[in-house]
Amino acid sequence: MKLIRDQGFSPYTAMDTHIAEWRAMYTRTDVFYKVPYVNSAGKKRHRSRASLSPARKVCREMASLILTEDTEVSVEKPNANKWLQAYLAESNFWPAGYRAVEGAFSLGTSAWALSFDVTDDATRITLPRNDARMVLPLSWGQTGVTECAFVTRIVSRGKPAEQVQIMAMDKDTGTYHVRTWLLRNGVALDPEAEGIIADFDTQSRFKPFGIFTPGLENVHDDLSPMGPALFADAIDELKAVDIAWDAFIQEVANTGVKVFVDDELIDANGAEGGDPVPVGVAEDMYYRKVEGKEMKNYIEVFSPTIRTDQLLTALNTALAELGDQCGFGQNYFTIDKAGGMKTAKEVVSDNSQLMRSVRKHEVVIRGAIQDVVSALLDNARIHCGADIEEDFGPVSVHFDDSVITDTQTEKETMLSEIAAGVVPKWMYLVRFYGKSEQEARDIVAAEAPAVPAFF
């Protein structure tokens, strides 16, 4: 932190406590998952609470609904779009993007930041992911974060080190610079000696990063540039789910068949040199029972009643409330699948809450993708010699909503509108195939029949 302050910045850390709490629930390392008890010898012990990992489940599920390999990202100018599509196909773009979105839901914030691998022969640009613990906003406003620091752990020459990068606008050049420092055990290293450019001028006006947050209001810190976790308002519901699941597991484990064998029978067999009482593989089923000498059953079997129906009801109630608090609706998560997601048409009518939630998150995530792709295109043009127009136009992001909407019906509706002359044909290619407007117009024009000339 001192290093960043020495550069004239005040890194934003107000959300650190909340991020630590959310991560503890997400990774199941919270004290809630250690259940204390006292054993028969009076010793204090603890056991791990059985868990369905509900925090990770809701984050993973929401991310899978928003960002898939069918998501279309395009740009207006044809050369730029051609290069972008090739980059998307060859790079690890979508898996990395999915993890970035899941990271935003789990800790409230994540980021994609451009990384430049500069050699004498060529420059290669990659998009490493940073979670909320690594992201330190430096400047922000109504348009989002404009300057940011990233603190990560790297391995340099086989030894771990801390890397601090500040991505900020340089007033002298009017472009973004990426300044890098390396620390090992608090001692500064020479970045150049480690093969890292200490001050890299991107020569671009686009910020070389994109900040991902959920489409939720951050009520934990006013005017914060960072977001809340998807489950920030559902901590009690997360615990309710795992309390119910843990009770279910304990019920099954503790209500197995118990066989009580009279102590006299065991002693008699052992004293006379006979065979011991057989126990089989489930030896924890057998217990001694101490009784008098009067007439009695030497072996008794006790089979407790398992309360699975009641426990499943409690679990499904907790899951319904968790789904409701996290924007999925009350019928999305259920053990018996009686009211879960069905076909797209049924979801449209049954789960409008989910649709609204996904749309809300898409708006914010779209902006982050547009930021990082714009920077990628501009820097590829400048540093990689890519054939990209200088004014490549706006970046378009089309999410695949076929899981929550009836895409086939939307296509049929638009085709009927095209046939009726309500909308032009090229809009169909833009809406469902991610083409830029110019590309779509060119394709439609190429397929149009030639009009004969009359003299």
Image (cartoon, rainbow, N blue to C red):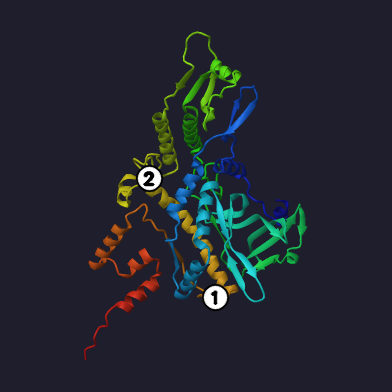
- Which sits in the foreground, 285 or 223? 285
The amino acid on which the numbered mark 1 sits, given as a three-letter code, is: Ala
- Residue 389 x, y percent position in the rendering: 50, 75
Q: Earlier in the sequence, mark 1 or mark 2?
A: 2
- Residue 25, picture quadrant: top right
Q: Mark 1: give few (<14), some (14-19) or many (20+) Cα within 10 Å.
A: some
- Residue 120, picture quadrant: bottom right
Above or below residue 182? Residue 281 is above
- Residue 193 x, y percent position in the rendering: 75, 66
In the rendered image, which quarter contains the C terminus?
bottom left
Above or below residue 10? Residue 420 is below
Please indicate whether residue 60 sits to the left or right of residue 177 in the image: left
Please tell me the numbered disc located at residue 353: 2
Q: Which residue is at a point 48% across and 24% down the rendered structure image?
A: 258
Q: Mark 2: give few (<14), some (14-19) or many (20+) Cα within 10 Å.
A: some
- Residue 110 x, y percent position in the rendering: 56, 53
* Local SS, label 1: loop
* Local SS, label 2: helix
The amino acid on which the numbered mark 2 sits, given as a three-letter code, is: Gln
Please tell me the numbered disc located at residue 23: none
Q: Are marks 1 and 2 in contact (CB under 8 Å)?
A: no
Q: Is residue 217 visible?
A: no
- Which sits in the foreground, 250 or 85? 250
- The residues bearing labels 1 and 2 have C-alpha atoms spaced at a distance of 43 Å
Q: Which residue is at a point 49% across and 70% down the rendered structure image?
A: 84
Q: Which residue is at a point 64% across and 26% down the rendered structure image?
A: 44
Tag 1 residue: 386
Q: Residue furthest top?
A: 294
Q: Which residue is at a point 47% across and 9% down the rendered structure image?
A: 295
Please indicate whether residue 296 sits to the left or right of residue 157 in the image: left
